[in-house]
Amino acid sequence: MPEDRELAVREPDRRSSDTMEDKRNIQIIEWEHLDKKKFYVFGVAMTMMIRVSVYPFTLIRTRLQVQKGKSLYHGTFDAFVKILKADGVTGLYRGFLVNTFTLISGQCYVTTYELTRKFVADYSQSNTVKSLVAGGSASLVAQSITVPIDVVSQHLMMQRKGEKMGRFQVCGNLEGQGLVAFGQTKDIIRQILRADGLRGFYRGYVASLLTYIPNSAVWWPFYHFYAG
């Protein structure tokens, strides 16, 4: 029947219209709506699982970027095999314990973002303004925590048996557990302090801010724009 055909055509249009209307009315989850316990516990647990999975490749990438030409490794797979043979599985996780402290910066990022949005809401109801200011502030706080941890972690990544790769070398035998992880960390921290002072922990800090603050400040307003 013609009426049935017309109804069949109109029904998808009506559903599409309803979907668009629902999209426009999506509620933005603010700080007060979050279950804080689940947010922090699950957030840290999920991030840790991801870190465990990708850290060996972060270490390999760092070594490939630092080496002179192809003096040590000829590529990702070659580096993976050589590190595994020379140092075992633990060799792929040098600096990992220190790097896990960046989980704090991740939680600080989200917390700063949400609290800043709440603060800015007292002065502006514009979602764009709230997201812009909160995104930039969150990156400032996160990078202030992350950069020193990354500096120490990357120096630990450079520790290997044989040829020296980085600026600093831990004192002691790298074979097996000749020097416990936090002993190596303490040694690297002392060497950085002696060589560069406190500023040594913030090498690349300004570059990090110039990279992440604009990115975060622009990303969040667009996120809410696409969602709304």
Image (tube, rainbow, N blue to C red):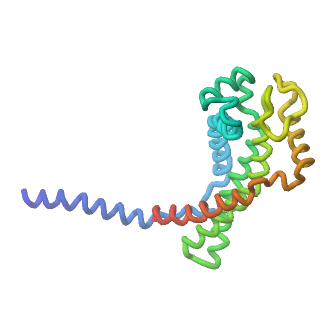
Residue 116, position as x, y percentages in the image: 67, 67
Residue 10, position as x, y percentages in the image: 20, 62
Depth check, front residue: 208 or 14: 208
Total count of labels = 0
Residue 79, position as x, y percentages in the image: 65, 29
Q: In which quarter of the image is residue 46?
A: top right
- Specify whether 182 is left or right of 82: right
At 48% from the left edge and 66% from the top edge, which residue is drawn?
A: 225
Position of 22 relative to 167 (above/below): below
Picture quarter with the C terminus: bottom left
Picture quarter with the N terminus: bottom left
Q: Residue furthest bottom?
A: 123
At 70% from the left edge and 58% from the top edge, which residue is drawn?
A: 207
Position of 140 relative to 86 (above/below): below
Q: Residue furthest left?
A: 1
Q: Residue furthest top?
A: 85
Q: In which quarter of the image is residue 54?
A: top right
Position of 18 relative to 78 (above/below): below
At 69% from the left edge and 39% from the top edge, which residue is drawn?
A: 62
Depth check, front residue: 163 or 55: 163
- Specify whether 202 is left or right of 26: right
Residue 114, position as x, y percentages in the image: 64, 63
Depth check, front residue: 79 or 102: 79
- Specify whether 1 is left or right of 210: left
Depth check, front residue: 140 or 30: 140
Q: In which quarter of the image is residue 174?
A: top right
